Amino acid sequence: MRNTSEVTEFILLGIPHTEDLETMLFVLFLSFYILTLMGNLLILLAIVSSTRLHTPMYFFLCKLSVCDIFFPSVSSPKMLFYLAGNSRAISYSGCVSQLFFYHFLGCTECFLYTVMAYDRFVAICYPLRYTIIMSHRLCAILAMGTSFFGCIQAIFLTTLTFQLPYCGPSGVDYYFCDIPVMLKLACADTSALEMVGFISVGLMPLSCFLLILTSYSCIVYSILQIRSTEGQQHAFSTCSAHLTAILLSFMPVVLIYLQPTPNPWLNATVQVLNNLVTPMLNPLIYSLRNKEVKYSLRKVLEQVVLIHEK
């Protein structure tokens, strides 16, 4: 990807209509960011330290926590930097990197949610064959596949965006470099690229969502065949956390990239929720309804307290 643009840096203008709120936003977003990092690190420690959690479901949850650590780190540090009163400038290569890693991690998570739905489908619909089907080899292939296809999608979208010439203005009416706001700054007709990007960004989440919907349709059917109420409740409880996380992840994509008329303020608000709040909530969603994770987290926290006391 070669930079033929006259623009060497962009200026991040931030969230629209939030002038004079920099200090409050800095404190709020920094709190979200710290809680996100701490929550996901605790989930990682709980899974790694407990042999009871060394199963395919928690292996994928571990990767989700890794993504949730890096995903907000794409845009949050720079946002916090300028909210603290520092420069809003970002280099051309920095802008390219932001857009690439944002879509790489976002697409990886999308594929990962689909894989996690397949894992729950096998666990509930074929419980006796679960350990055979979800072998270590298959789990490794699926985990690597989510990153591989996420990378391919991100390369395509980044190349699509930055093959355009950017000759000014350089003010990005947003708090990080994303496709819709960057296309507005291009010194060329972007209508064809907007359509291609719209199809690409919309088609991937829609395909994943349909696969997830198919998996959960089979899961619900299998659960309804369970005669005991206790068995049904246990099966539903193992899936409810995943479904909640899926809704929190997919709704922002629909609101931001598939709306006919973009609304900068709405997009920025939804992106903040998607970048900071959802990764912060995922550890709570997966731990509050899971006794094994709560037990392992308690053990990790007890060890941390003991180390601190020593």
Image: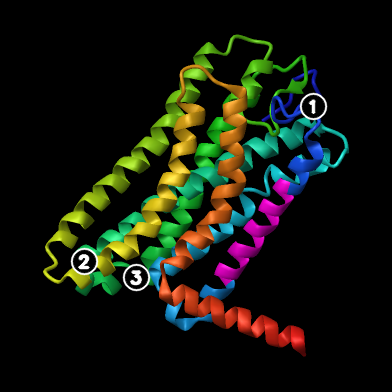
What's the residue at 18%, 61% (across, down)? 223
Quarter that holds the C terminus: bottom right
Magenta region, main secondary structure: helix
Q: Is residue 24 left or right of residue 251?
A: right
Viewer-closest of 273 and 140 = 273
Q: Earlier in the sequence, mark 3 or mark 1?
A: 1
The image shows residue 146 at horizontal and vertical percentages of 46, 51
Among the 4 quarters of the image, the one containing residue 166: top right
The image shows residue 122 at horizontal and vertical percentages of 26, 63
Helix, strand or loop at label 1? It is strand
> What residue occupies the far right of the structure in this picture?
86
> What residue occupies the far top of the structure in this picture?
189
Circle 2 is placed at which residue position?
A: 232
Circle 1 is placed at which residue position?
A: 11
Q: Is residue 229 left or right of residue 308?
A: left
What's the residue at 24%, 47% (across, down)? 214
